[in-house]
Amino acid sequence: MSVRRRRFDRLIPAYLEGALSDRKRRWFENRLRDSEPCRAEVATYQRMREEVRKVTVDYPDSYAWQGF
């Protein structure tokens, strides 16, 4: 994997959160425009995030935690 691709992969979460600087966002979006594998990776990441959001967690009540 190239250095540029590793950099791109590391920036995916921040891009999806809208947390990249303007300079990094422009670089990232240029890669998206020019690279089908990069677009596919972002799409996969987005689908994964959507599935994770659907997961619910049932936490024990506070009484159960008192024994710890």
Image: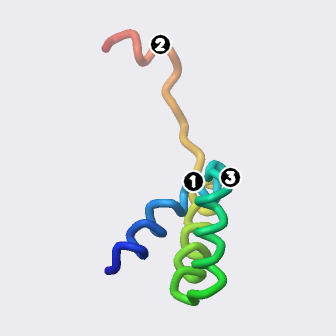
In the picture, the disc for residue 33 is: none
Image quadrant in which the C terminus is located = top left
Q: Which amino acid does label 2 sit on?
A: Tyr
- Give the SS element for disc 2: helix
Q: How crowded is mark 2: few (under 14 residues within 10 Å), some or many (20 or more)?
A: few
- Give the SS element for disc 1: helix
Q: Mark 1 points at which residue?
A: 14
Label 2 vs 3, first from the N-terminus:
3
Which quarter of the picture shows residue 49?
bottom right
18 left or right of 36?
right
Q: Which sits in the foreground, 66 or 54?
A: 54
Q: What residue type is labelled 1?
A: Ala
**Image location of residue 47, percent across then percent down:** 61, 70
Q: Nearer the viewer, mark 1 or mark 2?
A: 1
What residue do we see at 61% from left, 76% from top? 43
- Separation of marks 2 and 3 at Cα, in angstroms: 39 Å
Q: Mark 2 points at which residue?
A: 63
Q: Nearer the viewer, mark 2 or mark 3?
A: 3
Please, is residue 21 above or below residue 26 in the view? above
Q: Name the residue under label 3.
A: 18
- Give the SS element for disc 3: loop
Label 1 vs 2, first from the N-terminus:
1
**Image location of residue 40, percent across then percent down:** 57, 83
- Separation of marks 1 and 2 at Cα, in angstroms: 38 Å
What residue do we see at 68% from left, 55% from top? 22
**Image location of residue 35, percent across then percent down:** 56, 87
Please, is residue 46 above or below residue 13 in the view? below
